[in-house]
Structures are given as structure tokens and as C-alpha cells.
Image (cartoon, helix red, strand yellow):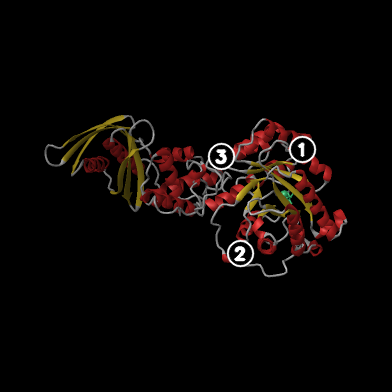
Amino acid sequence: MKNYGKYKPDYYLPPETCLDWTKRDRITSAPVWCSVDLRDGNQALVTPMELDEKLEFFKLLVALGFREIEIGFPAASETEYAFTRRLIDDGLIPNDVTVQVLTQCRERIIEKTLKSLDGVKNAIVHFYNSTSVPQRKQVFGKSKSEIIDIAVNAAKLIKSATAGLGYSYEYSPESFTGTEPEFALEVCDAVADVIAPTPQNKLIVNLPVTVETSLPHVYACQVEYMKKRLKRSDCVMISTHPHNDRGTGVADAELAVLAGAERVEGTLFGNGERTGNVDIITLALNLYSHGVDPKLDFSDLNSVIARYEKLTGMKVEPRRPYAGSLVFTAFSGSHQDAIAKGESYRAAHPDEPWTVPYLPVDPADLGRSYDGDVIRINSQSGKGGIAYVLEREFGFVVPKSMREDIGYKVKHVSDSEHRELKPSEVADIFKSEYINIESPLRLQSFTFDKSGGDVLLSMRLDNGGRDEVIIGNGNGQFDAAVSALKRAKNIDFTTSLYSEHAIAQGSDALAAAYVGLMRDGVTYYAVGVDADIMTASVKALIGAVNKITGRGETAK
Ligand code: KIV
Ligand code: ZN
């Protein structure tokens, strides 16, 4: 990369220090949101949306809670014009929604734009011209005063042509961040002088990061400067409109709000020119995760993704904040363990604020399911995650002392096959390695006699095709079964694990019992599953004995 010398930072700091925003550490209320999906987003698509698609997208935006929607650039194409007319003629704009249309500062374009709005109830006329140093020099070849004239003349035309209609107005010094802040101020003040906004009908001064060229704090300083120095600041609403060229569009918007912006223009999933506009879903859910009502509803994010992808032909990438398919997923063992413990803590303390490790928000709040989503299993996974999957999806509460054993086996399969394992595959390994191990010994039946103090057990086994009856006695039923097996098989072991529970999932009521038998420093684990809890326990015991006598050792 030897050519770095041909670049230089292409932005201008304000002439005074504007760092008050650094004293604020959070945003405490939602800004006014304006979706520009149907204009900035749409104009960046490989195939722009057709009229019916725009209509469906518009309805989605309304349902999500947007009350200001830039519907297009009506003078740009027939579809754009027809879409505006369709919304108005068919009465499709809810009373509490204001549509916004974009126009350049050229007379014919302004006229056509205003014509497209005939009969609309609430509208924002958004006009813009480029003010940056490179654009003045290279694209327009115009002086500063000529650039001001373009904006002022447009403001005059729009104001007089819409007198009495009750519209609102928005002005954007396009390429604001590449404009000297003092000059941007001059242009915006000149426009405000013409529009003559009031505190009741403010002029929206939109300060676009048309192309992102600076660190976000530089933009925040520029915004704060405008906010402080605009002549009619009580009659102006500062709006931010970041693009994402350096990947910090979200930071631009958030710092701009700290610096005084009250309104944010952006798109769903950050669709838009080049690297996109700022992603409003991320911004809104960042607020949500701080306990602030975002005033937009993303509680069914999967359906938003599906509709967005269908209408735009774009894909939401797996790591897109809040929305991506992998953003709530932990593969690594330590993360899985912390999540599983955090969720247990949460279940016991439901009234405390959400602090589950590694999950900045509760996936369920966004309509995401935990099953097969939060904890996924591969060779990086740990015993906690594997136990989580077995419990959450299959109802097996694997005792702690046994988790390492199953964890080792599952990871081994994933590692050797070099792939993720589905929950059902984890369950299959669990079943084949532990549940009802019936070779060489298989339980046929048993009876207990408790009449003489101790418990006396008689158990019928199938031993590799041969019938065998064994007996034993003990303090309790399980003890009696242990003694019968020890005596009959002439083996010694100690019981290091015994636990059982009803299996909560599935239609049939079943019980699971877990047994660990220690012999010569090695523990052999097995699980019994049966409708009867005692039968499940004896099956688990026989399974572990089978492992001692018939199958190889399991892990220590
Ligand atoms: O990015 C931009 O500068 C724009 C303007 C038209 C507001 O989209
Ligand atoms: Zn833009």
C-alpha cells in the first residue's frame, strides 16, 4: 500500500472548540426518526423497487413506527412520481405520517416535485445543494456566494409556491462534512432567513455525512458548532444523515445526537449509497439496550429481515448488529458457560435489569428464539454449552460431574468432522453414548421385597441372549440393585453419581436417571430413560456396569 501519500484528511474543523457533547455519556430519549429507505436506499439498489414494492415497503415503515418517511425523488423518474401520486390519490398516508420528498435546487425540478405533492396533507419539502470545497471547485466551478444563491433561490421559490399549504421544509448543505463549517453556517442561515421558520414550524437543517471522511468526533464538533451558531437556533431542528464509508455511521449519528441533533435520517439495515446510510435498527436498539424507548418496534426482527430482503434484493449479513443470524450465537465454551449461568441467574432474579453476559439484549425481545440460536455447538464449544442444548432442547439436565465426559465426546465428533453439530446430532451422540446401554446386560424385569427391613431385589437380565436372575439387598432399592450387580458380576466400584428427574419435554412423561460408577480411578457414566423412575435408575446402573465390563473406558 505504497500510495497512501496521495490522500489527506478531507474535512474542516470548526473555528472554535466544540466539545460540550463529550460531557454526555448517553442518549436519554429517541430522536425524531426519518426513514430514507425509499429514496437514498432505493437509489442505491441494483434494481430499484417498483411501485408496488415501494408501497409494501412504505407500509412496513409505517407499521414499524416511522412518522417521517422520505418517499422519493419525484422528479427523478416516472415511478418515483407515480408512487407519490399513488400514496396521495389512494389515501394511503396515515394522518400522523408526514411524507418527505427530495429535490435539487433547480427550478424545473422543484416545480415538478411540488406538483407531485398536490393534495397531500403533511409534507416536508427537502431541498439540497452541494457546498463542499471539492464539489464547488470540481463539479460546479462556483464561488461561495454563487452556492449560497442556489440555495437561497430555491428556498424562495419553494416558500412562495407552497405558501399557505402548511408544509415543512428541510435544507441539506450536501457534502456538509467536506464544507468549511463557517461557510455551511452562512448557507444555512441564508436559507433560514428566507424560510423564516418558527418554533412551531421549524426548519430542518440536515447535516449530511454525504461521504464519511473523518473520525466521528470531528463530525460531532461540526454539528455542535452549527447548533450553537445558527442564527435562528430555536426555530431550527438539526438533523443528521450519516453515510458509512469509514464504517462509523452509527457513531456519527450517536455523537451528532449528543452534540445537539434532534432528528436522524437513515435506513433499515443501513441500505444506501456505497457502504450505506446509517442503520436505524442499530441506532434504535442501541437506545433500547440502554433502557430508552426507541419509539420504533423491532420486536419481530425476523419478519422485517424477510420483507426487506424480498423487496430490496439485499442480504442482511450474519454479523449485522441485532439482526444478523450469528449475533446472539456463542460457539466458544467460556461464552456458552457464562450465558448458561447468566440465564439461570436471570431466571432467579427476573426483576433485575438485564445483564446476561455476552447478550447485550434479550434475543427474545427481538423475536429471536433461543433454541438452536444462542448456543451452537462446534469444536470450540464447551461442556456448559452442550449441557445447555441437551437441557433446553431435549429436557436432559445433565449433572455437572458428567458434563466433561459428554463434552469431550461431542467436541471430538465436531473436531474430527470439522463442522458444526446440529442440536439433534448432539442429542444422538448423547443417546448412543449413554442412554439405556443394553449390551451385554439388558434389564428384563425386577421385583423388590421390603418386608424384612432391608430391601431385597430380584432382577431378571438378558445377558447376551442368556436369561439370568440375580439378587441383592441393601438399604434402599438402588443399593440393592448395586449389590446384586456387584455380586453377580464379581466387580467392585463405588457410585460417584446418582441423580434423576422427570423429562419436561415431549408428550410422553418420562424420567431420566444418571449414574456414575468409579472403578480404578475411572468413572463410567450412563443414563437410563423410562416411564418409571426406578426402572430408569436400574437401567442407568446396568448401563454403567456394561461400560465397565463390556465396553471401553469413558473419559476420566
Ligand atoms: O447523503 C446526502 O448528502 C444526501 C442528501 C441528498 C441529503 O442524501
Ligand atoms: Zn444520503
Residue lying at the far right in this picture: please name it: 141
| The one of 448 and 114 positioned closer to us in this rendering | 114
Q: Residue under circle 1?
A: 115
Q: Residues within 10 Å of mark 1 (few under 14, many from 20)?
A: some
Q: Amino acid at mark 3?
A: Asn
Q: Position of residue 524 (x, y in %)?
A: 35, 46
Q: Residues within 10 Å of mark 2 (few under 14, many from 20)?
A: some
- Residue, x 54% and y 53% (percent of image)? 287
| The one of 85 and 308 positioned closer to us in this rendering | 85
Nearer the observer: mark 1 or 3; the answer is 1
Q: Are marks 2 and 1 in contact (CB under 8 Å)?
A: no
Ligand 2 closer than 8 Å to the CB at disc 3?
A: no
- Residue, x 29% and y 39% (percent of image)? 537
Ligand 1 closer than 8 Å to the CB at disc 2?
A: no
- Residue, x 56% and y 57% (percent of image)? 27
Q: Residue under circle 2?
A: 21
Displayed quadrant of residue 37: top right
Q: Secondary structure at mark 1?
A: helix
Q: Residue under circle 3?
A: 302
Q: Secondary structure at mark 2?
A: helix
Which mark is first along the chain, 1 or 2?
2
Nearer the observer: mark 2 or 3; the answer is 2
Which mark is first along the chain, 3 or 1?
1
Q: Amino acid at mark 1?
A: Lys
Displayed quadrant of residue 395: top left
Q: CA distance from mark 2 to mark 3?
A: 35 Å
